[in-house]
Amino acid sequence: MLFDLPPEDPDQAARPLTVVRRLAPLAGVFLLAACATGKATPPASPATPAPSATGIASLKLEVLTDRLGPPMKRGTGTCPSPGRNVDQLRPITLPRSNWELASATAEEGELGQATVTPDGALWALHETGRTQEPVRWTGSAWQKLPALPLGKDPQVRLGAASADRAWIIVESAPPMSPDDPPATYVVSTWDGRAWRSERVDLGVRPASGEELAAQGAWVLLGDRAMRWSGKAWQTAPLHSYSYQVAGTTEEPWVIAPPDPDDEDEAQIQLSRWTDQGWQAVPLPEGMTLPPGTKAIHPDKPLTEIAGVARTGPEEFWVAGTFSWGEHEPVDEEDIPVSRRLVMRNVAGRWSCWWGPTDDDQPDPFVDAVSDGRGGLWAATELGMLWHLSDGRWTREQAPVDKGVPVIRDLAGSPGGEIYALGGIGSKRSAEETRPALWRLKP
């Protein structure tokens, strides 16, 4: 099997690395790779048995801050939705992709939850629907970490701070009712030689699995965030339960799900880290339904954020999906309708660009990252890679050996490489896929 690889150096045992996933629109990252610099990976000691479920120590936490950051002034600019068939993105489809298929194994499953650490290591999870295994990208192939017992049907998230340190977070005993005790979490840390597990209890009661996330050195647990400082875990409060960390370890963003039952127009979906805590970033106002739309609930369209990318000192972009429900007259069924949406914020002022309405086969954005040159890359679920450069969008299909691509995640490296993770399937479905990694070299 391609995951069971010989050491890169015949005289040394190569040290393993790791990988993870992202939520899809209308329902709700991470990967270890070798350094992008191409330096040799230090040898690992013989694998130590994974820690058992008993005797797990309590995680000691330091307070990074006990308050939220100062509120960001509400941005100017409104974003009314144009007609259903209007396409303001207008991408040019390239006949040949600039991306390369770096890996496509014969095993089943997908890759997701990708993160690249400051030293260039790429981590992720190999997920099959039954198992979630951390794997390591060596620069040319994947390697597994030693097995870690995760229990039955766990919600697993993976984070990493460097090529030598990564962790898996699993929710343990989630509450099933308001009277149940708060959820606890187990953080299992890989130190380059063995796993060490510690239990953390923050006294929160999130719904099972939906408010657990990680990326880089950040972990979201309920309404708290934790950050690895290099020496200890530190905590800070969040505005609300959040499901995704975007950006980088140095400039992280937190994304919360939209709540159709929340009547508060100031619902916080996006926050950014400042030295004073997590700061709410209000989305643009006036995000209306297309003219003439007969929605089931015209007052409750949803804006779901898929990715955030900083492209300048005072500029960042948000890629996502704008969705609502309609009554389909032929089959007389209620159906979801959506359109892609890209938002730009420059010094607090918002601008928006809308794609056409997807009635038949939606292909939503799933992530976005900076291209390192003032533009950005965005990926859609069905294998399209979009590039914004000098105000113009182009898009290209992720190349495959055979089958169809499915993309779950994007990650950029300090060396300028961009990675896309997901799978290759025999049909356009999240099922029946085999893990795949695409790479764009600088």
Image (tube, helix red, strand yellow):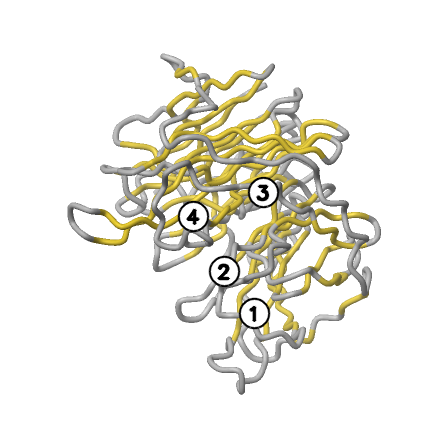
> Of the numbered discs in the image, which one, if any, rests on residue 156?
2
Quadrant housing the N terminus: top left
Q: Earlier in the sequence, mark 4 or mark 2?
A: 4
Type of amino acid at the residue the image marks with label 1: Pro
Callout 2 secondary element: strand
Quadrant housing the C terminus: top right
The span from disc 1 to disc 4 (Cα, nearest Å) is: 33 Å
> Of the numbered discs in the image, which one, if any, rests on residue 115?
3
Residue in front for this viewpoint, 141 or 370? 370
Callout 1 secondary element: loop
Callout 4 secondary element: loop
The span from disc 3 to disc 2 (Cα, nearest Å) is: 15 Å
Q: Earlier in the sequence, mark 1 or mark 3?
A: 1
Residue located beneath label 4 in the image = 24
Residue in the image at 59% along x and 70% along y? 185
Q: Position of residue 76 (x, y in %)?
A: 70, 37
Type of amino acid at the residue the image marks with label 2: Val
Q: Can residue 387 be seen at all in this image of the molecule?
A: yes
